[in-house]
Amino acid sequence: MNGKIDNWAGKRVWVIGASSGIGAACATLLLEQGASVALSARHRASLELLCVGQPLALALPLDITQPVQLRAVWAELARHWPQIDLILVVAGGYQAMRADTFDLAAAQGLLALNVGGVFNCLDVALPWLLRQGRGGIGIVASVAGYGGLPQALAYGASKAALINLTESLYLDLHGRGIDVYQINPGFVATPLTAGNDFAMPALMTARDAAAAMLDGIERGQFHIHFPKRFTNAMRLARLLPYRAYFWLIRKVTGL
């Protein structure tokens, strides 16, 4: 569904959300394979540490909820790179939330980051990609976007929105030479999941998750999900009638 990538050497990739977790691991793997990588996130010190000894790395701190910052960073990046091959929007947040602990301010903040922040990224990315008529954009959603889950009252809704968004982007951009990647990780050991107090089936390391993500991009896949033994089970569960789906989720999670 997308073009294949045989070699990362010489490719220019902007990883947004690169200070920790999957984003940091992805940036590291790309640098190891010879790509030029721009790393963006809110935490300047973490970005600069990842760039030490990496002549092909460029640290560009930003907060994706701030459109003015994004436009300034885009302008700075455009001065360094005449073209771009891939933009990966990995940045996002997580907060467990159920109906009896609903927090409007927290829910709005999560949506502003996970959904609004991605739209802010599109505001600078889409004109650039459309002008050059090539390249690609990958957006990290989550298996939590496949269907409703306990403790994912706001988070799951934000990731479901990104799944829908990437589908629309693909329909709009594929015919114009631009690749689109929908990336749905399962449970990954990151600072965001460290506080979970429930079992996380098929938990992956950030590096393994990043490798799976890049493998899917290299293969030209649109829907990249991992680990398959968990994500495929979630996809199949979503095909069940609601009565069966709700029973299964309660039984598996115990929540």
Image: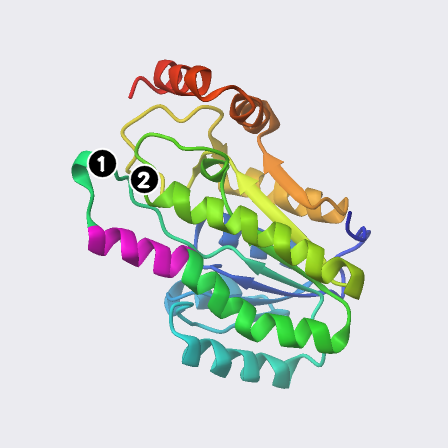
- Magenta segment's dominant SS is helix
Label 2 to label 1: alpha-carbon separation: 7 Å
Q: In which quarter of the image is residue 134?
A: bottom right
Amino acid at the residue labelled 1: Ala
Q: Residue at x 34, y 37 (%)?
A: 152
Q: Residue at x 37, y 44 (%)?
A: 155
In terms of depth relative to the viewer, which is nearer, 148 or 79? 148
Q: Which residue is drawn at 38% across and 31% down?
A: 149
Q: Which mark is residue 99?
A: 1
Query: Answer yes or no: do the residues labelled 2 and 1 have beta carbons within 8 Å?
Result: yes
- Residue denoted by label 2: 153
Residue 252: image location, x then y, percent: 39, 16
Task: Tell me the SS state at disc 2.
Answer: loop
Q: Quadrant of the C terminus?
A: top left
Magenta-tinted stretch: 104-114
Confirm whether residue 32 shows in the render: no
Residue 82: image location, x then y, percent: 71, 81
